[in-house]
Amino acid sequence: MLVLTGQMTVRQALLNFPKDTNDKSIISAYHALIHFEADEELRAKDVLYKEEQDEYLEFLADTLSKNRTLPQNIIKSYKNYYSNVALPKDKNTKKILAKICKFLNIK
């Protein structure tokens, strides 16, 4: 994942998310990145928390890159945030898929 390796900022990654999606796995991954960014200070103080969060994001990216749905417990954990999704709107399916691949660093 480009964010974890420092090759992409969280903001850039969020802008690469597909627009106008109803896919709960994608929305959950979006919110996981928002939480990652919000936890910057905690990550700097707590190495174990940082490692666990990195592994979690790697799992999300790996699952989505294999075109699989995230586990229901993960989707459910972000359910309260679904109505607040700030994803931009775009109805072009090719663009959506291209952006998912770019986010996941798939060529």
Image: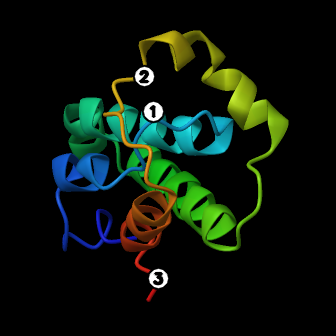
Horizontal side, residue 35 vs residue 9: left or right: right
Residue where numbered disc 3 is placed: 106
Q: Position of residue 34 (x, y in %)?
A: 34, 34
Residue 38: x percent and y percent? 27, 29
CB under 8 Å between callouts 1 and 3?
no
Q: Residue beneath label 1, please?
A: 31
Residue 85's disc is 2
Q: Is residue 48 above or below residue 78?
A: below
For the residues labelled 1 and 2, say whether their Cβ atoms are less than 8 Å apart: yes
x, y percentage for residue 93?
A: 51, 57
| Image depth: mark 1 or mark 2 in front | 2
The C terminus - image quarter: bottom left
Residue flagged by tag 1: what amino acid is it? His
What amino acid type is highlighted by mark number 3? Ile
- Tag 2: residue type? Val
Q: CA distance from mark 2 to mark 3?
A: 24 Å
Q: Secondary structure at mark 2?
A: loop
